[in-house]
Amino acid sequence: MELCPSVKNVLLLDSEGNRIAVKYYCDDWPTNSAKEAFEKAVFAKTQKTNARTEAEIVMVENNVVIYKFVQNLHFFVTGGEDENELILATVLQGFFDAVGILLRGQVDKREALENLDLILMCLDEIVDGGIVLETDPNVIAGKVASQSVDAGGPLSEQTISQALATAREHLTRSLLK
């Protein structure tokens, strides 16, 4: 058992087991088909449960999986078989609550897909390389919100998609004058 708690993956699936957002932090599943097979196994083992009020725990392929459902979204956090379940549950709750804050309480598949960038940034703020960085949903949501607000900054500090959106906005404004 390692000294530092680690997460193997974080999954956000829809109510049919399809990917919304996933991040893998280890090489236990080297191919995309292995990752999809694991996601299907997790979904099949958990779909008949009612994890809507509290997080539930299950062992899948010698991994501890903590999960919770809301609307048509299924949130999962996976750790090794010796991993502390309370830490994994704290990571799950932080992710779950941060997504709720960022989506303004409208946590469903449509909103998640429309705000996929925020959800992926949220995952980046919570776990990096399998190491848990932050679990406080208010801090996570605050960092993600401040990063998404920075899109109006200088072009050199923007991502390509943000820069293209800014350029498109400026072009539209100049054409409408």
Image (cartoon, rainbow, N blue to C red):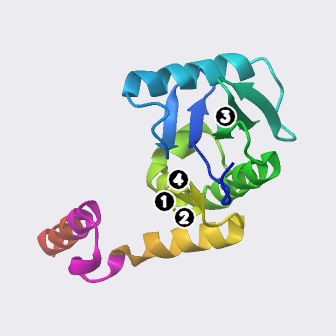
Say left or right for 128 vs 72: left
Q: Which mark is residue 61?
A: none
Q: Residue at x 87, y 40 (%)?
A: 53
Q: Look at the numbered discs 1 and 2 and tell me whether their residues touch, using CB distance below 8 Å.
A: yes
Please state which amino acid type lies under the numbered disc 3.
His
Spot occupied by residue 139 in the image (x, y as percentages of width and height): 66, 73
Please state which amino acid type lies under the numbered disc 2.
Glu
Chief secondary structure of the magenta portion: helix
Q: Earlier in the sequence, mark 1 or mark 3?
A: 3
User: Outermost residue toward the right?
Assistant: 53
Q: Which residue is mark 2?
A: 125
Q: Residue at x 66, y 49 (%)?
A: 106
Mark 4: secondary structure: helix
- Cα distance between the residues tagged 1 and 2: 6 Å
Q: Which residues are magenta?
A: 152-166
Spot occupied by residue 114 in the image (x, y as percentages of width and height): 47, 47
| Mark 1 residue crowding within 10 angstroms, few (<14) / some (14–19) / many (20+) | some
Q: Which residue is mark 3?
A: 74
